[in-house]
Amino acid sequence: VTQPAHGAGRGKKITPTDAAIWAIAHHIDYVEAENINDTAVIERIKLCKPDLIVVIAFGQKISPEVINSAKYKAINVHSSALPKYRGAAPINWAIINGETETGVSIITLADKMDAGQVLAIVKTKIEEDETAGQLHDRLALLAGPLLIKTIDQIENGTAVYQEQDHEKASLARKLKKTDGYLDFTQDAETLDRMIRGFWPWPEASTDYINKKTGKCTRVIIAQAEIVKTVNSKYNPGILDDELNVICGKDCLKILKIKPAGKSVMDFKAFANGRSTEPGDFFMKIEK
């Protein structure tokens, strides 16, 4: 059971989900469900007489009727070490908040979001330069073997169901496009975490202003590194003599940038194409 085909890319071409594409390629029967709790969908699931329902990044609340249609009910693969970071964007918020470790949890489905019993957890270090996209792909590779092992334990009766410590729960709320609007009065470390945590979506955006021409270009900062500085003669957002961006504390050296409607490029190529000079600046986008 997967989400319906949706518009993707610049042309918003209607594209099936990855799950649907996989099912077609492997001749597996599948259902596209706008609402998994619709009576017709539930009946279709019941006809399969499932032993176990496995939920991965499905994005819909699943009713008890669906859960109870399976012999061993339902389990969920969640990309954090629960109870920390329950919610829609655990990978992003772990990076944005400066966590050094995260993981994958296999849990039962509960009425409250990501509050089910834990069957298995695997933890991993978050690398210093890792983006949300890179961490997502790495966690997916960890999740596969953990899921298979957990399913085997459920089948042979050795699975251990443990309650979460609900007092330690934290929320990783769904991201909005405006979350990625950078404010260079913040310190460089915070901004670097945002750039990595918001890649590949919603992306870290700002407006580049060429002081000489007054031209404004909407850009996405795809990669940067922190440059430690003492007091600067420039204000936050302004490019210094080395074309680093002054922040509330320290600087950011931009490595990769994506102008609106264009591909990601080296910042040097971007700067050369616009005759960028010290004193040009980045300005926060108004929400």
Image (cartoon, rainbow, N blue to C red):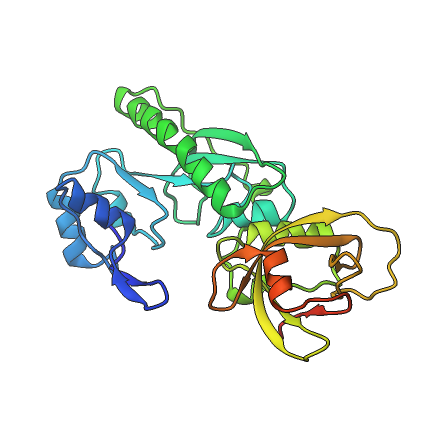
Q: How many marks?
A: 0
Q: With respect to residue 126, does 273 lie above or below?
A: below
Residue at 46% from the left image edge and 41% from the top image edge: 79
Q: Looking at this rendering, what residue extends furthest in the bottom direction?
A: 214
Residue 278 showing in the rendered view: yes
Q: With respect to residue 256, does 154 lie above or below?
A: above
Residue 287 showing in the rendered view: no
Q: Is residue 129 left or right of residue 27?
A: right
Q: Is residue 49 left or right of residue 139?
A: left
Q: With respect to residue 169, does 280 lie above or below?
A: below
Q: Position of residue 82 (x, y in %)?
A: 51, 38
Q: Position of residue 80 (x, y in %)?
A: 50, 40
Q: Foreground residue, 224 or 194?
A: 224
Residue at 58% from the left image edge and 49% from the top image edge: 196
Q: Foreground residue, 41 or 224?
A: 224
Q: Position of residue 120 (x, y in %)?
A: 43, 28
User: Which image quadrant is residue 35 in?
Assistant: bottom left
User: Which image quadrant is residue 257 in?
Assistant: bottom right
Quadrant in which the C terminus is drawn: bottom right
Q: Position of residue 247 (x, y in %)?
A: 76, 59
Q: Is residue 182 left or right of residue 143?
A: right
Residue at 53% from the left image edge and 51% from the top image edge: 172
